[in-house]
Image: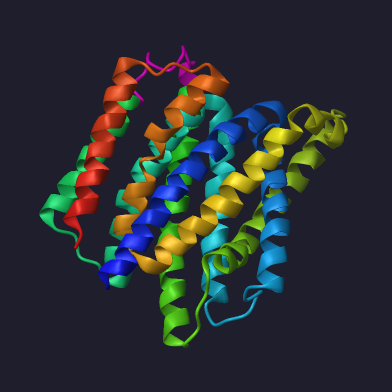
Amino acid sequence: MAGSDLQSGAAAALLTTFFFSISAVSGSRVSRALGGTEANFLRILLATTFLGLYAHLLGGGLGGHALPFFLLSGLIGFGIGDLSLFQAYPLIGSRLCMILVHCLAAPIAALVEWLWLGTALTLFQVCCSLLILVGVALALAPGEHLHIARKALIAGVAFGLIAALGQGFGSVVSRKAYFVAEAAGENIDGITAAYQRIWGGVAFATLGYVAYRWRLADAKKTSSLAERVRPVRNWVLVNGLAGPVLGVSCFQFALSKAPTGIVLPIVALTPLMIIPFAQRFENEKPSRRSLAGGLIAVAGVVALRFSLK
């Protein structure tokens, strides 16, 4: 793989961390106001609209041999992964969600890519992955999370683990999609890939939203979504643009240029970038233990990134 491709992929991954950090804070704000299911549904609905305008006017639309793989990637990542992420946001906060999801997704993706696509892991890379897990465990240790109740912490971590699995598996499937497109002589840009990928999550998010509204109707707790969205409409717009539009487009471009073993460790730097945003908008002051755990986890992903040639 050419050095210029790796450099452009790494640059796109760094830009992804910026957009993902904004998405995390805005997503946490919206999910607290509307609930995770409705917040995720609005986010994907907005993103599909914006991405679709580009893809059908300037990009590749919904064509190409790689479409089934991008749809599957979206089902796993946007569907299962992001729905779980939005359930975790109100429980443990955006910063801890990002530490858990992005730091665990990196070793998960590296393992899956090794088993499926043949990317071998060295002993040093395995040690780096273990270092990441130690850092995450330290950052999430009970008693350091703004007095989060044990039940909420356990549930939040469980949803975060599912989200990490979704991002890890979904990223490797996207890599497979690019291999398929290259073999067919097709060139898929990052925004078109993000659009094709998001359709896998649209069906999942819609089903979840319909089921959620159905339960509210049975309990006679229905209320106007427009009325509840109005106070956080700006955050809804920022969340829809920053994450699934700008962030995922950069993320898909990075995956088209570099393997997951390079892209996801860089994206895992998001927890550090999110700290000033979380302090500003959520009044969340990270503890020393949480910061230490985050630094250890980031040290692991940085070492993993530089171990890959």
Residue 144 highlighted magenta (yes or no) = yes
Q: How many marks can you see?
A: 0
Secondary structure character of the magenta stretch overall: loop
Placement of 252 over or under 233, stated as above or below: below
Q: Which residue is nearer to you in this view: 211 or 113?
A: 113
Q: Which residue is nearer to you in this view: 8 or 94?
A: 8
Residue 151 highlighted magenta (yes or no) = yes
- In the picture provided, is 186 more to the left or to the right than 2? right
Q: Quadrant of the N terminus?
A: bottom left
Examine the image and state in which quarter residue 40 appears: top right
What residue is at 57 percent from the left and 75 percent from the top? Answer: 67
- In the picture provided, is 258 more to the left or to the right than 35? left
What residue is at 52 percent from the left and 77 percent from the top? Answer: 66
Q: Which residue is nearer to you in this view: 98 or 11?
A: 11
Q: Residue furthest bottom?
A: 184
- Asked whether residue 133 is in view, the answer is no
What residue is at 28 percent from the left and 57 percent from the top? Answer: 111
Placement of 234 over or under 6, stated as above or below: above
Magenta segment boundaries in residue numbering: 140-152
Task: Give how far across and how far down residue 133 sits, in percent.
Answer: 27, 38
Q: Which residue is nearer to you in this view: 108 or 183?
A: 183
